[in-house]
Image: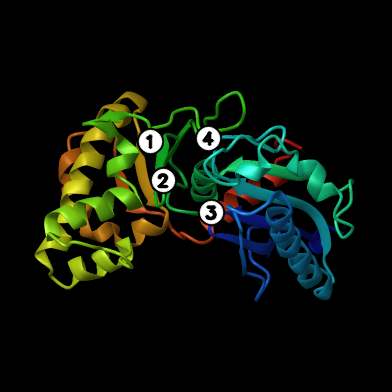
């Protein structure tokens, strides 16, 4: 019975695995959203145990509600072969490099080899979720920028998220050369913190998060405001040629730092105001749910199975 179908979706981050049970229409099962420590710097077994724990926990919730597990979808940062389900990362989850996660998950007794498992890049998944149920719905050419520990980018053409030969984003922006490094050095957690340290003159910024700088900027702190303005200007100027070339109509911001997007919004809007095709600049509808929606959509569409 299709009304009993349910899926386990897992958004894999460097710190936590965010998991939930979803119906085919994208609605979460009540109280199914769970956080599990990722152990991304740990041993292979520690990382796999964390994934098993998250999946088994969700399977129990699913069964308690009388639903039937129809598939598992996971979002992962890159580099990753999304068709093979194999991590290529060396900076985190390095103990999983070249390990077939699809095979590992199939060996979980509560799952088994007959349950389809798919993988999707986290930025691609976020944009797909927004095209389906969020602020990008109705736009053919949309783009999403993820602001967090790293800098991600995904875009769609005619409503289809564009991917490369292994399922990752077709275009990446984090490696764009900028000053004496790359763009991600300036537009990511480390970029915000480095600029804040420089502008504030503090000898140490230990314990300070970007969310703190956003809070202080909202409260009127001039140094914190300047940090967001400068980062926002760098971001907008770097994106502008690409957005024009791709004829992007909708530009969305996701990731944890986008919670403070309002601190840079005016300067981003001003810098991008002459892009004729661009009709909407906004944060994503749901930082928490959009990647999960995109993951669910990939398995509902039988992608990478």
- Front of the two marks 3 and 4: 3
- Tag shown at residue 174: 1
Name the one closer to the observer, 19 or 188. Answer: 188
- The answer to whether mark 2 and mark 1 are in CB contact below 8 A is yes
**Vertical placement of residue 186 versus 207, above or below:** above
Specify the quadrant of the image occupied by residue 201. bottom left
Sequence-first disc among 1 and 4: 4
The residue lying at 31 percent from left, 28 percent from top is: 242
- Front of the two marks 1 and 3: 3
Mark 4 highlights which residue?
161
Mark 3 highlights which residue?
14
Sequence-first disc among 1 and 3: 3
Q: Secondary structure at mark 4?
A: strand
Sequence-first disc among 3 and 2: 3
> In screen coordinates, is 270 left or right of 24?
left
- Tag shown at residue 150: 2
Within 10 Å of disc 4 (Cα), the crowding (few <14, some 14-19, many 20+) is many
The residue lying at 26 percent from left, 27 percent from top is: 241
The residue lying at 76 percent from left, 37 percent from top is: 305
Q: Secondary structure at mark 3?
A: loop
**Cα separation between marks 2 and 1:** 8 Å
Sequence-first disc among 4 and 2: 2
Q: Is residue 268 visible?
A: no
């Amino acid at each position: 019975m299709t009304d009993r179908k349910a899926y386990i979706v897992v958004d894999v981050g460097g710190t936590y695995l965010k998991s939930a049970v979803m119906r085919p229409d994208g609605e979460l099962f009540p109280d199914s959203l769970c956080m599990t420590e990722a152990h991304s710097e740990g041993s292979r077994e520690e990382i796999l145990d964390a994934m098993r724990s998250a999946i088994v926990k969700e399977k129990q919730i699913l069964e308690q509600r009388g639903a039937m597990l129809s598939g598992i979808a996971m979002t992962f940062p890159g580099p990753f072969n999304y068709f093979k389900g194999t991590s290529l990362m060396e900076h985190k989850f390095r103990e999983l490099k070249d390990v077939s996660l699809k095979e590992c998950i199939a060996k979980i007794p509560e799952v088994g080899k007959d349950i389809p498992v798919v993988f999707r890049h986290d930025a691609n998944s976020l944009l797909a979720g927004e095209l389906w149920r969020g602020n990008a719905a109705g736009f053919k050419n949309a783009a999403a920028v993820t602001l967090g520990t790293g800098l991600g980018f995904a875009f769609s053409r005619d409503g289809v998220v564009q991917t490369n030969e292994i399922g990752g984003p077709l275009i990446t922006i984090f490696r764009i050369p900028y000053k004496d490094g790359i763009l991600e050095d300036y537009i990511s957690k480390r970029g915000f913190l480095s600029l804040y340290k420089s502008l504030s003159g503090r000898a140490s910024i230990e314990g300070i998060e970007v969310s703190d700088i956003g809070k202080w900027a909202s409260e009127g702190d001039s140094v914190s405001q300047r940090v967001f303005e400068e980062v926002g200007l760098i971001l907008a100027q770097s994106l502008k040629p690409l957005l024009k070339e791709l004829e992007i109509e909708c530009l969305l911001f996701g990731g944890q730092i986008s919670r403070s997007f309002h601190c840079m919004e005016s300067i981003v809007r001003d810098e991008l105001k002459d892009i004729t095709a661009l009709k909407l600049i906004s944060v994503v509808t749901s930082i928490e749910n959009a990647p999960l929606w995109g993951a669910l959509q990939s398995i509902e569409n039988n992608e990478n199975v």
